[in-house]
Amino acid sequence: MQQNRVAIVTGGASGIGKETAFKFASKGDRVVVADFNVAGGQAVAEQIMANGGKAIFVKTDVSKYEDVEALVEKAVDTYGRIDVMFNNAGIGRVTPVLDQNLNDYHNVIQVNQHGVAYGIIAAGKKMRELGIKGVIINTASVFGFLASPGTFAYHASKGAVIMMTKSAALEMADWGIRVIAVAPGAVDTPIIQGYKDKGMVDSMKSKVMGNKLTLPEQVADTVYLLTLDEASAINGSVVMADEGYASFK
Ligand code: NAD
């Protein structure tokens, strides 16, 4: 079993990122929890250490390249390498397209699209420099290719994540670095609270097989599997962790 790798998880304070941090730690990997939520991120790192694992928390705003670069440096300073970069931090806003607050639009693009781009670039450069055949996983969404009302900027950002993944994978294969997108459907995390308030969650649930929300642990399991050598043929792909959301009408 691959163990003792170093995995950076952005958005690691909550939801999918938090469960993915726990997953890597439970398998013997060292985890760098990154988030701009300091209390939440520290709590995740502390819980990993309380369970005998290895973790640090690094306060990071993924929408700032200098923060993401410093995050990668901190991981290497602390643990000597990085094997996995999980670019997962994201935000959602629900507003009709023509009533869009442009600040909200820019924020969503800045975090969900540019934040992932910065993670791909900063981690990819470091893996190439250190000669590490690492894995970069980016959180996309079924909303990267299925339209839904009220989430214009979110669709734009997640569509970009999918194409950035393919483009980066094509080039980074030269260094043995794999780049993959994971696309969840409707996952029970705080991000969908805004959708709940607007009555969208029942409609999302009805598209998932079994009429339920996916658990963040299930997405974490998918992410972990994709990082293993046994998944070496999976590259440049969008891997659905959506329980059928995008497969049925
Ligand atoms: P979440 O709100 O529980 O977690 C998101 C985390 O990202 C939070 O800890 C938050 O503090 C952090 N974050 C936000 N902006 C940041 C920034 N600028 N810098 C650093 N950290 C930042 O939600 P989640 O569902 O776990 O979301 C994780 C990812 O999954 C997101 O990219 C989201 O778009 C995606 N996703 C979620 C669902 C779903 O149904 N929950 C479905 C598809 C895709």
Image (cartoon, rainbow, N blue to C red):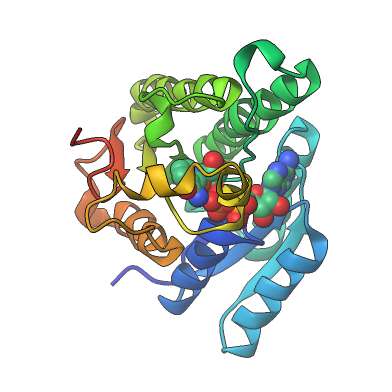
Specify the quadrant that holds the N terminus: bottom left
Q: Residue at x 41, y 22 (%)?
A: 147
Please provide percent x and percent y for residue 159.
45, 22
Kindly identify the residue that appears in the image at 41 percent across and 20 percent down: 163
- Examine the image and state in which quarter residue 49 appears: bottom right
- Determine whether, in the image, residue 115 is placed left or right of residue 16: right
Q: How many marks?
A: 0
Front residue (pair 130, 115)? 115
Residue 131 drawn at (x, y percent): 47, 42
Q: Is residue 130 at least partly visible in the picture?
A: no
The quadrant of the rendering that contains the C terminus is: top left
**What is the residue that sits farthest to the top in this orientation?**
98
Relative depth, front residue between 224 and 242: 242
Q: Which is nearer the eye, 82 or 27? A: 27
Which residue lies at the image location 44% right of the left edge and 70% below the top edge? 23
Give residue 54's quadrant in the image: bottom right
Q: Residue at x 56, y 60 (%)?
A: 15
Vertical comparison of 73 with 75: above or below: above
Q: Residue furthest front?
A: 199
Residue 108 visible, this orientation: yes
Residue 46 point in image, percent of width and height: 70, 79
Residue 64 lies left or right of residue 193; in this view the side is right
Q: Position of residue 26 (x, y in %)?
A: 45, 78
| Above or below for 237 versus 227 | above
